[in-house]
Amino acid sequence: MKKSLFLVMALVALSQAAELKKVSFEEYLSKFDYKERSDMKIRTPDMLALVEEHKAILVDIRFPDEFEAWHIAGSINIPLNELPKRLGELPKDKLIITACPHNDRSNMARIYLTLNGYQAKYLNDGLLRVADFLRGENAKDYLDEFKANKEKK
């Protein structure tokens, strides 16, 4: 029984690893289609829900000074220019959502992560939209849910 359970777990891990393999930019582009175009983006409400539930990691790829001035609770700061040397800090078993004020740098980070075997999306409406969304009760609700879900883990 233990051997068959181990075998099933190993096969699942291998299939997940196969799904998260590195691909070349040429291979990625040759397979790019409407589904990928849709799947590569995420909007503020969906991102907040996944981060609240700890199903995704929000990676703010702005420079440290920008992050220090203001950031979204629960996000981590890995500046775009540091991403290659800090890949090991990101789990491959969670969705990685990249974010910047608009979406230019976050889209570059998403492509890099995708090519390196991560499941990644970029925040389509940018951090400025998130800041606008998280006002008043929305901010309180987000923090309450984020903290409650963190305590459950």
Image (spheres, helix red, strand yellow):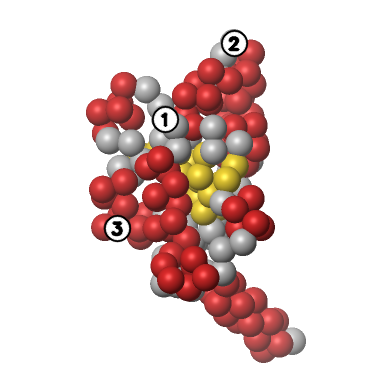
* Residue shown at the point (63%, 50%) measured from the top left: 38
Mark number displayed over residue 136: 2
Mark number displayed over residue 109: none
* Residue shown at the point (51%, 45%) measured from the top left: 122
Count of marks, rendered view:
3
Q: Are marks 2 and 3 in contact (CB under 8 Å)?
A: no
Choose between 33 and 50: the one closer to the eye. 33
User: Which amino acid type is marked by label 3?
Assistant: Pro
Residue where numbered disc 1 is placed: 101
Residue where numbered disc 3 is placed: 84
Choose between 54 and 18: the one closer to the eye. 18
Q: Is residue 7 left or right of residue 70?
A: right
- Nearest to viewer (mark 3 / mark 1): 1
The answer to which quarter of the image holds residue 99 is top left
Task: Find the distance from the CA under tag 1 to the CA under tag 2.
Answer: 20 Å
Q: Position of residue 53 (x, y in %)?
A: 63, 40
Task: Find the distance from the CA under tag 2 to the CA under tag 3.
Answer: 37 Å
